[in-house]
């Protein structure tokens, strides 16, 4: 009888961010090969993590302009 290992969504998120023990990571890698649902979910999480990482690289020009304008007004008012 095959052994079943259950993973929570938290476990899968920790896997995407390399926050599992080596044994847990190996088990999850095996699960992605065996279970298409787990594989697809991990793939989706990897994409979301990649998008989050890219979006946090720098503020928009609109935000920078607003901060600079605020700082300029604050300096004039001082």
Image (spheres, rainbow, N blue to C red):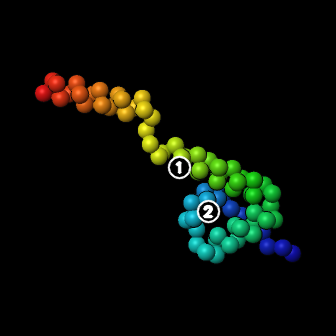
Q: Which residue is found at the position 70% from the left and 71% from the top?
A: 27
**Residue of label 1:** 53
Q: In the picture shown, does residue 21 fall above or below 58?
A: below
Q: Residues within 10 Å of mark 2 (few under 14, many from 20)?
A: many
Q: Which mark is residue 18?
A: none
- Count the labels in the image: 2
Residue 54 coordinates in the image, percent (x, y): 54, 46
Residue 32 coordinates in the image, percent (x, y): 75, 63
**Residue of label 2:** 15
Residue 69 coordinates in the image, percent (x, y): 29, 26
In the foreground, 74 or 61? 61
In the foreground, 8 or 30? 30
Q: In the picture shown, does residue 63 fall above or below 34?
A: above
Q: Which residue is found at the position 55% from the left and 65% from the top?
A: 19
Q: Mark 2: which secondary structure? A: helix
Q: Earlier in the sequence, mark 2 or mark 1?
A: 2
């Amino acid at each position: 009888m095959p052994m079943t290992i259950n993973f929570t969504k938290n476990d899968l998120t920790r896997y995407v961010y390399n926050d599992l023990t080596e044994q847990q990571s190996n088990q999850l890698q095996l699960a992605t090969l065996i279970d298409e649902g787990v594989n697809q979910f991990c793939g989706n999480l990897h994409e979301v993590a990649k998008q989050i990482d890219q979006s946090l690289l720098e503020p928009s020009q609109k935000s920078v302009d607003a901060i600079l304008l605020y700082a300029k007004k604050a300096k004039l008012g001082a």
